[in-house]
Amino acid sequence: MTDPLSSTFAALADPTRRAILARLATGECSVTELAEPFEMSMPAVSKHLRVLERAGLIARGREAQWRPCRIEAAPLKAVAEWTEQYRQIWETRFDNLELYLQQLQAQEKNHAKRPGRKPRRK
Amino acid sequence: MTDPLSSTFAALADPTRRAILARLATGECSVTELAEPFEMSMPAVSKHLRVLERAGLIARGREAQWRPCRIEAAPLKAVAEWTEQYRQIWETRFDNLELYLQQLQAQEKNHAKRPGRKPRRK
């Protein structure tokens, strides 16, 4: 059995499914409305929706004719919490990189200045 | 070709690979050291490392004998930035849920109080 976080990550590993979530973030809509911008067959869209639904990333209404899809926030919150534990790593790495680039720029500036500092012969 | 964010999410969709990242977050180590806690064959660990390496989540040293693995922060930062756009949704939803639970509790309190409020017959 797949653990919830692995299901969420697997469901998010597809640009069409992430685009569907981005659309649903603006509000509920029907499968037909969702399919429009993707130029995809309805079965293809339905397949993506099933993956998202199994991962708990979307929920579907119970109305027989019009089963609106809505985004579910809990798994996205779990992803954010999981990722947060690594924040210190990327912040430290990017700080070090910035420091290194500043040092490089300072060195280049000094090199560029040198010919100007050379005392002119009169 | 898989887009970078999809590769990252696919690589993270496995508890062993996430455990390897958690181990590497504490510092560089060799494949042998990584394999120890997982009771896994070296080929199985190597396969997971290749998935993580292709997704840019780890990098490996070039020393012939000892190729230390280290965590790479950039793809994790990309995941955090992608997830961040949904923060408002889960915060709003959880605020609404909290409000709803508070209302339920208040109602229950009132119901519980009612018998006490009933004027006693003397």
Image (cartoon, coloured by chain):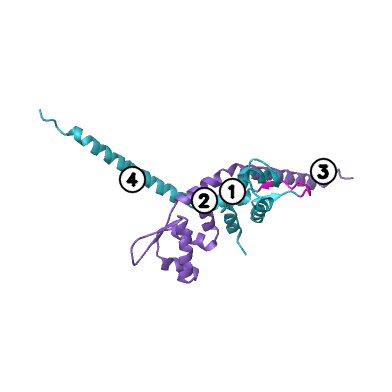
Chain colours: A purple, B cyan
Q: Nearer the viewer, mark 2 or mark 3?
A: 2
Question: Mark 3 is on which residue type?
Answer: Arg
Element on which disc 3 rests: helix
**Cα gap from disc 4 to disc 1, whole angstroms:** 35 Å
Q: Which SS does the magenta portion mostly show?
A: loop
Element on which disc 2 rests: helix
Q: Output the chain of dot 4.
A: B
Per the image, is A68 magenta? no
Instruction: Identify residue for label 2.
Output: A5
**Cα gap from disc 2 to disc 3, whole angstroms:** 61 Å
Checking the image for residue A23, the label placed there is: none
Residue density around tag 3, few if under 14, some if 14–19, many if 20 or more, within 10 Å:
few
Q: Nearer the viewer, mark 4 or mark 2?
A: 2
Q: Is residue A122 visible?
A: no
Question: Mark 1 is on which residue type?
Answer: Arg
Say if mark 2 contacts mark 1, CB within 8 Å.
yes
Q: Residue furthest left?
A: B122
Instruction: Identify residue for label 4.
Output: B100
Q: Residue B17 appears at what percent x and percent y?
A: 61, 50
**Cα gap from disc 3 to disc 1, whole angstroms:** 55 Å
**Cα gap from disc 4 to disc 3, whole angstroms:** 72 Å
Instruction: Identify residue for label 3.
Output: A117
Which segment did they paint magenta? B62-71
Q: Residue B43 appears at what percent x and percent y?
A: 68, 53
Residue density around tag 4, few if under 14, some if 14–19, many if 20 or more, within 10 Å:
few
Element on which disc 1 rests: helix
Instruction: Identify residue for label 1.
Output: B18
Say if mark 2 contacts mark 3, CB within 8 Å.
no
Element on which disc 4 rests: helix
